[in-house]
Image (cartoon, rainbow, N blue to C red):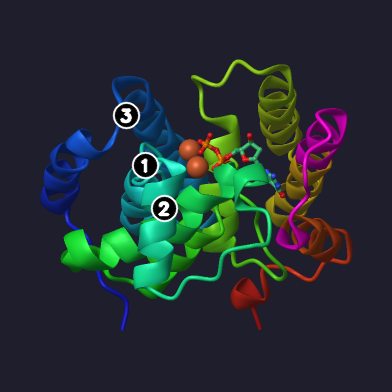
Amino acid sequence: MKLLYSDEMLNELREKIRPYLKPKRYNHTLAVEEEAARLGEIFIPDDVNRLRAAALLHDITKKLDLSEHLQICSRFDIIVGDHPEKEQKLFHSKTAPAVIREDFEGFYDEDILSAVRWHTTGRENMTVFEALVYLADYIEKTRTFEDCVILRNYFYNELEKGIEDPFETLRKTMVMSFDMTIRNLMEENGLIDLDTISARNSFVLKNCFTDNIKE
Ligand code: DGI
Ligand code: FE
Ligand code: FE
């Protein structure tokens, strides 16, 4: 059974997460919440408050340093890659679900945990819920990086045209986002996680949103 989150629970959550985040990250988090709600109204209107909760929790361990992440990974048997120092940005999405379980008991919810877990790399065959948290993080309104602006404009322009199914626009936007991330990682000579590649290929192959197929 799906847990439901009242507006009051979300108000409390908004205050509870504050000490976990630096001020700039807190503002980003609120902007992701707003964006996730906007996307939710379009794609899964019954799940808007759960999307808000996932957005509020998505970067909850972003402040931790590598050794703190590694401690959590060891305590919870979370698999660490072979080159942790080269993939530091991937840790916060691995450790956040553990902290949610421990510190945010009322939000122990499979959809929230998986959306948070996969919000940085994505993964093969993403659910609509996971994709919306991922995309909200990419295109929220405080992001000024050129790719984010391009992606935000592409997505909302296509939706506004109203020519294709919104889920097709969402799928194409997801492909674009992974292409941008992969291109940027290549330019900075970074390591590309296999989940990032699998996510990209799966959207190209249209292996996505199988949770949302209507009869
Ligand atoms: O935590 P945020 O900054 O809000 O956003 P995020 O969790 O999506 O993290 C974005 C960063 O993660 C960005 O600098 C690129 C990095 N990233 C995404 N996919 C990969 C990656 N880094 C590596 N090394 N490999 C990836 O596949
Ligand atoms: Fe993040
Ligand atoms: Fe984020």
Q: Circles 3 and 2: CB distance less than 8 Å?
A: no
Quarter of the image where the N terminus is located: bottom left
Residue 174, percent from left and from top: 73, 48
Is the C terminus in the top left, top right, bottom left or bottom right quadrant? bottom right
Give left or right: position of 135 versus 180: left
Mark 1 or 2, nearer chain start: 1
Residue lying at 46% horizontally and 45% vertically, measured from the top left: 66
Q: Which mark is residue 64?
A: 1
Name above or below for residue 106 compared with residue 45: below
Vertically, is 48 above or below 141?
Answer: below
Q: Is residue 107 magenta?
A: no
What stretch of residues is rendered in magenta?
180-195
Q: Residues within 10 Å of mark 2 (few under 14, many from 20)?
A: many
Label 2 sits on residue: 69
The answer to which quarter of the image holds residue 147 is top right
* First reached walking from the N terminus: tag 3 or tag 2: 3
Residue 48 percent location from the top left of the image: 37, 53
Q: Above or below — where is 28 with respect to 87? A: above
Q: Are marks 1 and 2 in contact (CB under 8 Å)?
A: yes
Which mark is drawn over residue 213?
none
Q: Tell me which amino acid carries mark 1.
A: Leu
Q: Nearer the viewer, residue 106 or 39?
A: 106
Give the crowd class for mark 1: few <14, some 14-19, many >=20 residues within 10 Å.
Answer: some
